[in-house]
Amino acid sequence: MAGRIAQADIDEVKARVNIADVIGERVALKPAGIGSMKGLCPFHDERSPSFNVRPQVGFYHCFGCGESGDVYTFLRQMDHLTFTEAVERLAARIGFTLHYEEGGPAPEMSGRTRLFAANAAAAEWFRLQLMTPAADAGRRFLGERGFDAGAAAHFGVGFAPKGWSGLMDELTKQGFTREELINAGLVSQGQRGVYDRFRGRVVWPIRDITGQTLGFGARRLFEDDNGPKYLNTPETALYKKTHVLYGLDLAKRDIARGDPRRVVVVEGYTDVMACHLAGVTTAVATCGTAFGADHMGILRRVIGDDAAAEVVFTFDPDAAGQKAAVRAFASTRGIKAQSFVAVAPDNLDPCDLRLQRGDGAVRALMDAKAPMFEFVIDQRIAGFDLATVEGRIGGLRAAAPIVAELRDPILRREYERVLARRLGMDTGEVHGAVTSAARAEQRSEKDAAAPRAVAAQAAASTPEPELRVTLATLPRSAEVALERDAMMGFLQYGHRIDPELRRRALELPMRHAGLDAVRQSVAAVEDLSRTGWAADAVSAVREPYRSLAAELLTGPFPARDDDHATVSAQDLARRLVTRSIDSRKRELLGAIQRVPAESEQGRAVRLELRELDAERQRLAADSQ
């Protein structure tokens, strides 16, 4: 029986896969020093990027939350995979054939992997059904909206035929159980038994950013269908409607390549299709729910912390669309990207706009965007009669808190002028109202923070487990700085340092306990030519010093390029050896004062001093 994957294959797959490519599918990464990249952490919410990736060593670490690991760890954390599943997925990615050891335990397969497989099989079945005679209504629906067979294939659009259990019967034949199909949201349990959830509908696969199918959205086609117009997969272990954006798997590449980076948020599946076909290939949509903070978190990881990036929302100009814009505005607070609103003329959504006015009109819609801040201000004052004093004051009171949310004083001043023009009021009056609103918000935040402060004080009175040691917690001294920089050099460039010099330096104990724990782990590595040795060394560091090791491996090493970094790392190794020589000299100089000069012990001390001086001179010469 096939069992464990051969260790040689595990190492080979990891060596062939670029960890930056895998992580870059989910996180916008930018260069951050020699051989390092940085982005917003996918494991916790942050405003400034602290997630570092070093492709050459196949390792990542977040300086904020402490998460770290190799490419297998990343996939296991993000997609809740077993180790075996992570290796198999990456092997399939690069077309590598794995070998399994005979007689070992059977490969693990998690329930999530079975759900992914069921969804993939369902997507293929729906796609094939769109080509059958029974799908005429589905093809007609797509054709009337300007989508041909090529467009349907590009987006994976399919058809769920009428009937009771066509999908269930097919997937059961493929080995999936009814329980798995229920857990995937593909079938439902009713009084009359188990039946297909999607029947008589056009079906869109909803994929995550890597292209894996999480669920489906389906549109009603027939009059005798009493269900909702749009029906989505229910919440499952894979599908969370607030954690997914339709079309992001197709849009991510062009988003990353854009200058500036731009994401267009529309309201439906057909709108995404219309935008992409019209050339706006960065369009995405929510899936049956309002755009919220979780959606914004997904986009922030894709666009990064680029202040020039743009998020453009398209909304209907009706009341519902205006409310959606205000809700979306709340989710954009705190991001560096600029947010805009694009409202199509004549109440047209992007799909209808493309049908009636062509691809150019869809592209022009994006160019006619307006700053979301101005749009929201207009919505706040729209219900007031600005021809009256009472109306202007009411509008000011409604809009001032919005302007007060701006933290940039220059930007706030500019929008105070915008609001003053909208209201027909003096800028000084508006400034006073905004300042008062800002103070009120600060008081509110202070009141809200008081209970948290009490809780924090109570928590501080109870013993805490030993905290992880990080670069930020290291003592500030010249000795520790030397050891810190040297260990960073060893982890990042140890394989390029002269082996004998490296060995001598790593034999010397560090004066800081955490850095010495890292030293011991690096010194224990037998083969520094092996791919992934540094990541393995970090994993072997004992707690609470493992985070420190991860930061040393991923932190920016101060040098112009790899060659200069190697020279610097070797110099740090020499300084450690020189420090040890100088320390020994001080001991001997003290000892020589206590022994007779002509004694055997005195002669031995002087001989050792001469040898140390000669060794120090050789080290100095090597550094020239």
Image (spheres, grey):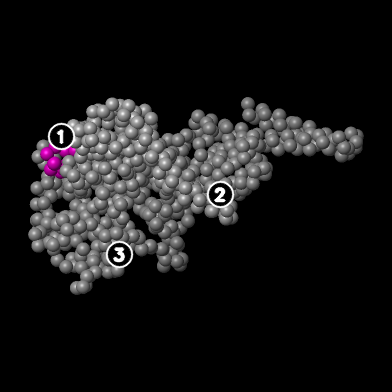
- Nearer-the-camera pick, 608 or 82: 82
Q: Is residue 224 above or below residue 208?
A: below
Earlier along the polypeptide chain: callout 1 or callout 2? 1
Earlier along the polypeptide chain: callout 1 or callout 3? 3
- Percent position of residue 600, x then y: 88, 39
Label 3 secondary element: helix
- Nearer-the-camera pick, 252 or 459: 459
Label 2 secondary element: loop
Crowdedness near tag 3: few (<14), some (14–19) or many (≥20) residues, C-alpha within 10 Å: many
User: In the rendered view, does 472 fall on the left or right side of 442?
Assistant: right
- Nearer-the-camera pick, 34 or 293: 293
Q: Disc 1 vs disc 2: which is toward the camera?
A: 2
Q: Is residue 546 above or below residue 133?
A: above
On the image, numbered disc 1 is attached to which residue? 360
- Percent position of residue 257, x then y: 31, 36
Q: Which mark is residue 183?
A: 3
